[in-house]
Amino acid sequence: MIVARRRPSWWLSLAAAVVGCSGGEAAVVEVGHPAPSYAAVALTGDSVSLRRLRGRPVLLNIWATWCAPCRVEIPYLERLHAEHRGAGLEVIGVSVDARGEEQKIGAFAREMGMTYPIWLDPDERVSALFLALGVPASYLIGRDGVLLWRHLGVLRDTNREFTAALAEALRPLESR
């Protein structure tokens, strides 16, 4: 189930700007193409970016504290984080909660047992860049920065496409 929420009017302008990139070519958010460049601020206050994670597979999950389906998938995301961080997997939760909700986000993360990094995006730039029409939304990015898999809705351990893409993402680049 995808939870869509009313977007501010500026969101459409931002989405149009993302689609209309240099040279008039459309931005591509498709499996097999490089993932969009994205940077944010972590809940810890640090500046973070996908570029800094290059060389490691990344599972980028867009979520919010008000999203009931997000609560369903967070335990699975936490399991993935615990099981595969030794192999280099970076599970990143990008909260699209409103500005000023950092304490609420932190309390929610503690309640849910989230130990993976949480990035803050109250302006929902990540949604526009990755063309996410609601939350939750997940994107698996390979060590080389290429989008390997994407999904709108709850990510479950029964998703075979994700399991196969994750196995590929965890393989070292030299063995492909």
Image (cartoon, helix red, strand yellow):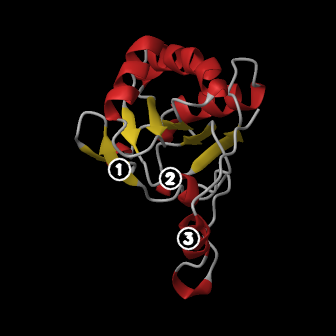
Residue nearest the observer in this picture, 165 or 75: 75
Q: What residue type is labelled 3?
A: Val
Q: Is tag 3's residue or tag 2's residue first in the polypeptide sequence?
A: 3
Residue 67, compared with residue 156, is above or below; it is below
Residue 11, horizontal then vertical, whole percent: 57, 64
Q: In this view, does 127 lie above or below 66?
A: below
Q: Name the residue under label 2.
A: 126
User: Which residue, given by chain and number where applicable, does mark 3 sit on?
Assistant: 18
Counting other residues with Cα less than 10 Å from the Cα at mark 3, is it few (<14), some (14-19), or many (20 or more)?
some
Q: Pointer 2 and pointer 1: residues touching (CB < 8 Å)?
A: yes
Q: Quadrant of the N terminus?
A: top right
Q: Are marks 3 and 2 in contact (CB under 8 Å)?
A: no
User: At which x and y percent is residue 148?
Assistant: 63, 44
Q: Is residue 12 left or right of residue 113?
A: right
Extreme-bottom residue of the structure = 23
The image quadrant of residue 153 is top right
Q: Which mark is residue 40?
A: 1
Q: Residue at x 59, y 79 (%)?
A: 20
Query: In screen coordinates, is 95 left or right of 74?
Result: left
Q: Is mark 3 on a helix, strand or loop?
A: helix
Circle 2 Cα neighbour tier, 10 Å, few/some/many (<14 / 14–19 / ≥20): many
Amino acid tagged 2: Val
> Is residue 149 visible in the rendered structure shown here?
yes
Residue 151 coordinates in the image, percent (x, y): 70, 40
Q: In the image, 64: left or right of 111?
A: right
Which of the two residues, 114 or 50, is positioned nearer the viewer here? 114
